[in-house]
Image (cartoon, rainbow, N blue to C red):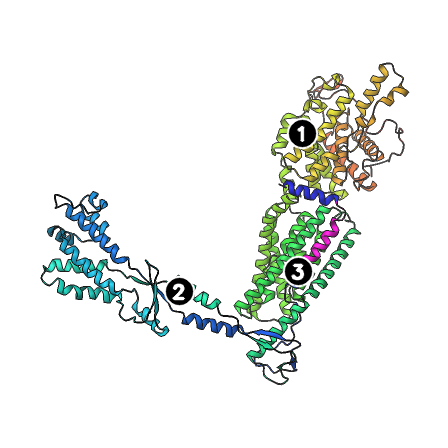
Amino acid sequence: MQTEFLKSFFSFAQQNQSFRWWLLLMTALVFALSYTASNLTEEHYAYDLGDVANENIKSPAEFLVKDDKATENKRQQVSEETLTIYDYNDRLVKNINQRLTRSFAMGRSAFEETRPANIESEASTLPYGKEKFEKLLGISVSQGAFAILEREKFSREIEALIREILTEVLANGVVANKEMLLRERDKGGIILRTVGSGDEKIETNLRHFYGQDQAQAMVRIIGEPLLKNMDYTVKNLIVDFSQRLLSPNVTRNTSLTEEMKRKAQEDISPVLYKIKKGEMILREGERVTALDLLELEALKSRVKEENHVANAIGAGIIGAIVFLVVYLRISESKRRGALANNKTLLFFATMLCLSFIAARLAFNMAEVVTAVAGSSNLTMEALFMAVPLATSAMIVCLFMDIELTASFALILALCTGAIFENRFEIFVYAILNMTMAAYWMQHCRERKVFIKAGVKLGLFNILVATALNLYMGEYAPMNMAMDGGLAFLGGIAAGILTAGLAPIIEMVFDYTTDIKLLELSNLDQPLLRRLMLEAPGTYHHSLVVGAMVEAAASDVGANPLLARVCGYYHDIGKIKKPLYFIENQRGAKNKHDKLAPSMSSLILMSHVKDGIEIARRHRLGQPIVDAIQQHHGTRLIVYFYEKAKRQLKEEGGKQSGREKEINVADFRYPGPRPQTREAGLVMLADEVEAAARTMESPTPSRIQGLVQDLINKTFSDGQLNDCELTLKDLNHIARNFNTILFGIYHHRIEYPGTNNGKSKNGSADRQPPKQPPSSGNDDSGEDAGRLKRLGQS
């Protein structure tokens, strides 16, 4: 659904006559930026390492050469020389001691009548048990070890000995991977950072730190003199607990180390050296070295920068000329109205600009991928074939037509070839790819058409890719297979991407596709079901009108599906006041009998306004809204106009004088007249079908005469002047209308023993004969200017 901003913008675009020139300028500018952003400057001095120079190359001006390799080497050296940061956790001993105190205090509380006052509250409140002891201590305890502790009543001496051993071992420092630590000796040591205080110092003696295995061994060594007089089982328990409570307190801080390396690298300035003006860069006959290539690349970069502005101006002018030529060609074609609408022109320009940007991004990605891959199989052309650029052509064809899309594809192919370094093969592939993509998207009425078109396009792309490879002299099976696979993926991706983007474009630009029209033509649509229940006569009339216009649409160059849907919804406004229309009164008294003719005319005209409001509220689409608004054109409501004149005459006034008091405009529909073929068809079918209902004994000859007469009157009244329907078209329309009406009002046989419901006076299901209402002005000639023999050829 369009936002208020978009509606306001489109309204401004429609009314602003200079808007299309601004679009031309902006589209040319986008192309210029996309073009000059790529590497289009001619590559002079294209040498490889070891080639022999065939000319002398001097510097045209002074410039700096940036040696990226030397800069990177210097930065790598600085990174390698940066000392590694290790964190010393001075809080680990305190944490372990707290766990010892809490766990042993909990254990002793089961054997002491009075708990010490200095025991922490959590330990004092926990119930005695092995699980709670393990939770507080932080390690698992076997049943045997726990039994020993119970036997010793969780002795304070055991607790103190464990604390003493751990404190002495951790004071020296325990590292998780000592082998990795010792590698830091080549740098001259490490930076030891205390976690608690943040103090840092350079530590050069790295051997004195314990590794994990050394720390485990040191527990036994330190504990040997302390535990020599203790029971063997208690001694083993103390050693086991000490070893399992032990953990590294010196750890490598990778994040801070990398941050220091990054800062050290950033402090290194790029390695630059100056080339003087006139300095000989390369002499004829010399072999090209790595340094020569670096200087040549710097020289080419400088030339490109000098030509950047000139390239932008030139590309913009060329792009503007191409767009203008195509626009003028379309303007002179049979579809000259295709781009006359500023909103359509905006859509056309938007798709071009988005495609330019997509092509530019694809070029950048292709450059990066080919540079990283470094494989001869993965070329710029191969990667381009995987880009679903055909999506834009498929979308344009979906909302416009194949003729306009062909022009779009030509513009985009030319510009894409330029963006991809003026490569001929890119242009050929793009124009064939997009043209066939548009061809397979014609008359899209089902969602699966997107996928079918994508598969067909993928297979077609394989054929084009193979032909281009043969043309360019590339015969390697691996290269051809890769190009074909990427081309097939590009076709599939285009179909999938189109299916996803089409609804968005449809909502933003308020377009109506055949897919949406098919959804609206479903008679189970809530709006049509409401019409069937609330205004059944109008519903049946609308179905017949839809069938009539669909039958005639193909012969006059209109969209049959759009015409049928417009026929279904053209009288949708009658839902608001159904009983004020004769087809819905079902034998009841006519409500207009008690109304003034002017009021009756207002009620009849209101169904157009009501229909527009309902159509917009239900988002039926602008073409259907236009058909509702235009299907009566500016015709005169003859019946109530004549009734108003009769009333004035009956009041005793002089007709010649009193008729001037009646404003004819009050009895005319506000219009506008039909602007499209579909709206013109709906106008004619609406009038013909309504009149045919009033006929008594509707024989083919009488129907044919009625159709001819009504189409003549509508044409003579000028209602069809703006909808591009020709005299030949009117003849086709009359013939198709006759065919449909003959099928509805065909002759029925009388079955034996019945009278087919007929009474003495004729058919029981028909009303008394009425004369078909005139649709022209009352002062028109009886048969002046009428066309003859419509629908009879």
> In the image, which is nearer the foreground, mark 1 or mark 3?
3
709 to the left or right of 622: right
Per the image, is 32 magenta?
Answer: yes
Three-letter amino acid code at the position of disc 2 = Thr
Q: Earlier in the sequence, mark 2 or mark 1?
A: 2
Three-letter amino acid code at the position of disc 1 = Tyr
Q: Which residue is mark 1?
A: 539
Three-letter amino acid code at the position of disc 3 = Leu
Label 2 and label 1: CA atoms lie apart by: 80 Å
Q: Within 10 angstroms of label 1, few (less than 14), some, or many (20 or more) residues?
A: many
Residue 511 percent across, percent down from the top left: 67, 43
198 to the left or right of 557: left
Q: Nearer the viewer, residue 621 or 516?
A: 621
Q: Quadrant location of residue 54? A: bottom right
Label 3 and label 2: CA atoms lie apart by: 43 Å
Q: Secondary structure at mark 3?
A: helix
Q: Is residue 560 above or below residue 537?
A: below
Q: Within 10 angstroms of label 2, few (less than 14), some, or many (20 or more) residues?
A: some
> In the image, which is nearer the foreground, mark 2 or mark 1?
2
Q: Which residue is mark 2?
A: 257
Q: Which residue is mark 3?
A: 33
Q: Secondary structure at mark 2?
A: helix
Query: Among all residues in the image, which is located at the extreme bottom?
Result: 285
